[in-house]
Image: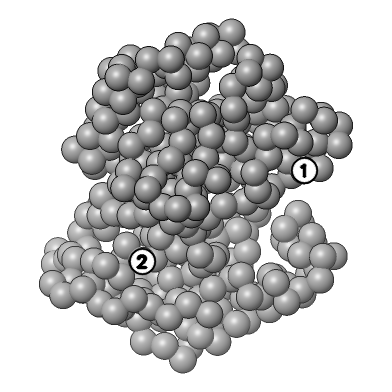
Amino acid sequence: MPAPSVRRILYVGQLRYGGTCRDRMEVLSSFGFDIIAFNVDPLVAAANRIVQSLAGRLQRGPLIRAFNARLLELARASDYDAVWIDKGVWVLPSTLSELRERASARIAIHFTPDAQFFSQRSRFLFQGIPLYDICATTKPFEVSSYAASGARQTILVLQGYSRFFDPALASRPQAAKSAGEVIFVGHTQPHYIRSLHALAKSGIDVAIHGGGWQRHARRHPWLGGYIRSDGIWGSEYAAALAASTIGIGLLGKHIPETTTTRSFEIPASGTFLLAERTDDHMALFEEDSEAVFWSSQEELVDKARFYLDHKDLRDRIAMAGRRRCVEAGYDSATQIARILAALEIRLPSAPAESPPVA
């Protein structure tokens, strides 16, 4: 059977600056595909909080209807070969079916970096899974759930890191203001609060960035001195990681998480990775040579203090971690190429221009 001919891709997702969804779209563009972009963000921003909540929590209401109507409007006015849907929790099965039928190669791809069965569940996604030609997930504990839901093909990929992450960004003038001896970027969870508090109590300068931390600081006053921002993205985020001494890899406890995007972004930035010990982390990086792992708050604090005091050893491990990321192909471009290869989609020979994003 000849390989499918794909040049133009209808790409659907949240395309805000610095997001991984936008990064995946830009990777496809760098491969030479022509991208027709459908950005979910303006629709969400235009809705009030009640409408947003109905859509986000229950997948109901006018935002869901507007999203599907606008998406079909663009599809009907466009000529494309395949559709790529990033985290399609609002895509009605009837919409997905039409999107795939209108694609000249009859290919529909789904990608999500999130746990869709253990959390963030969507009946529309579950109903649509059998319609996709491939479902890509970064969660090893959900692969069997896709198969049980009727997926034609499921591929497990790494969350990876984007082109933003470069050790050279540490020299940016503003990077030091966002950096710390230990940096954490992410939302709040009780486990995260306890782990960061343990570091702070030991006298370590912890830089915290992410949504929800200011609200938690009202109940945890110690946090006030460590919160640097309510969010940092794109090259600014990458620069903050690169300028920090240690990047901490915390894992959510609401799902059986074994790696996160930070597991790759921190070492890719040339920063020392101090992450929770899991089998997957230890398979990705050689312990004590390319990254360092911990299993308790006591071990976390002890190792943070030790490596803060031993710069030469810390730098050797950080450099080895960066090298492992590059040589092993942990970057997002390699992961996306694996998805395309699974569908026998060949890369266009010439790079396309970057797609406009509203």
Q: Nearer the viewer, mark 1 or mark 2?
A: 1
Residue 329 visible to an observer of this rendering: yes
The three-letter code of the residue at mark 1 reads: Gln
Name the quadrant of the N terminus. Answer: bottom left
The three-letter code of the residue at mark 2 reads: Glu
Residue at 21% x, 73% y: name it.
Answer: 351
Q: Is residue 295 above or below residue 280?
A: above
Give the colour scheme shown: one colour
Badge 1 marks a residue whose secondary structure is helix
Q: Residues within 10 Å of mark 1 (few under 14, many from 20)?
A: some
Numbered badge on residue 277: none
Residue holding disc 2 = 26
In the visual, does 123 lie left or right of 241?
A: right
Q: CA distance from mark 1 to mark 2?
A: 33 Å
Q: Is residue 110 above or below residue 12?
A: above
Name which quarter of the figure residue 43 lies in: bottom right
Residue at 39% x, 28% y: name it.
Answer: 272
Cβ atoms under marks 1 and 2 closer than 8 Å: no
Q: Residues within 10 Å of mark 2 (few under 14, many from 20)?
A: many
Of residues 265 and 64, the one drawn nearer to the viewer in this rendering: 265
- Estimate the x, y position of residue 136 in percent, counting from the top left: 40, 49
Residue at 53% x, 80% y: name it.
Answer: 358
Residue holding disc 1 = 214
Residue 101 visible to an observer of this rendering: no
Q: Is residue 314 above or below residue 66?
A: above
Of residues 208 and 211, the one drawn nearer to the viewer in this rendering: 208
Name which quarter of the figure residue 319 lies in: top left
